[in-house]
Image (cartoon, grey):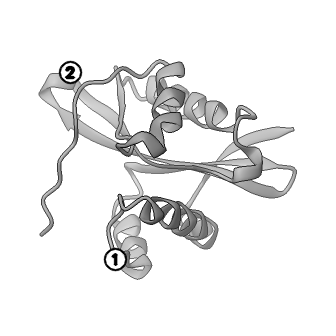
Amino acid sequence: MITVEMLSLHDRDIVFDLVGRLLCELRAGGDAADTWDPGKAGRDWAQNEDRFRVFAARDDSKVVGMLTLVECFALYADGSFGIINELFVEADYRSQNVGRELVAAAAAYGRSRGWRRIDVTAPAGEKWSRTVRFYEREGFVFTGPKLKLLL
């Protein structure tokens, strides 16, 4: 049975392992940044614990998926809202409602915070069409592409 729980900075080794695996999949598709510094990410996480959440899906004691959620603010969103930055489910657990459970936990958390929306960016391209369809099935609607500026 899959259960979802919130992780903390103390669980960073688990989270960073899953994020690393997610980035490997994205890099294989040519869509991820070339560098990722877990040390810097951990330090920044510590400074943002009040607005950064990680939800983990467990099958008994094994973590089989995770979702990261950050609280942001924008006038167009009527104030505070959430952004899903990472969502990863182990290959053997895909199409078994693990992602759905993670999104449901994030949505429940957002509602408890008074948010009116959660945004997510899915990778572009045919290789990731299954990912886009997953988000659409979960009620997300396309609002436009996301661009980045590397600093």
Front disc: 1 or 2: 1
Q: Nearer the viewer, residue 26 or 16?
A: 26
Q: What residue type is labelled 2?
A: Asp
Give the quadrant of residue 110. Answer: top left
Disc 1 and disc 2 in contact, CB within 8 angstroms: no
Q: Residue at x 25, y 25 (%)?
A: 143
Q: How many labels does the image show?
A: 2
**Rendering coords of residue 63 (x, y %):** 73, 56
In the drawing, what numbered circle is on residue 61?
none
Mark 2 falls on what kind of element?
A: loop
**Rendering coords of residue 129 (x, y %):** 47, 35
The vertical placement of 21 against 58, above or below, is below
Q: Which residue is drawn at 41% across and 29% down?
A: 113
Q: Which residue is drawn at 46% across and 42% down?
A: 128
Side (left or right) of 64 relative to 122: right
**Rendering coords of residue 51 (x, y %):** 37, 48
Quarter holding the N terminus?
top right
The vertical placement of 147 against 37, above or below, is above
Quarter holding the C terminus?
bottom left
Q: What residue type is labelled 1?
A: Thr
> Going from the N terminus, do you reach mark 1 or mark 2 first?
1
Mark 1 falls on what kind of element?
A: loop
Callout 2 crowding tier (Cα within 10 Å): few <14, some 14–19, many ≥20: few
- Residue for badge 2: 78
Side (left or right) of 110 relative to 77: right
- Residue for badge 1: 35
Q: Real-space Cα distance between discs 1 and 2?
A: 34 Å
Q: Residue at x 42, y 40 (%)?
A: 126
The vertical placement of 122 against 39, above or below, is above
Callout 1 crowding tier (Cα within 10 Å): few <14, some 14–19, many ≥20: few
**Rendering coords of residue 100 (x, y %):** 63, 30
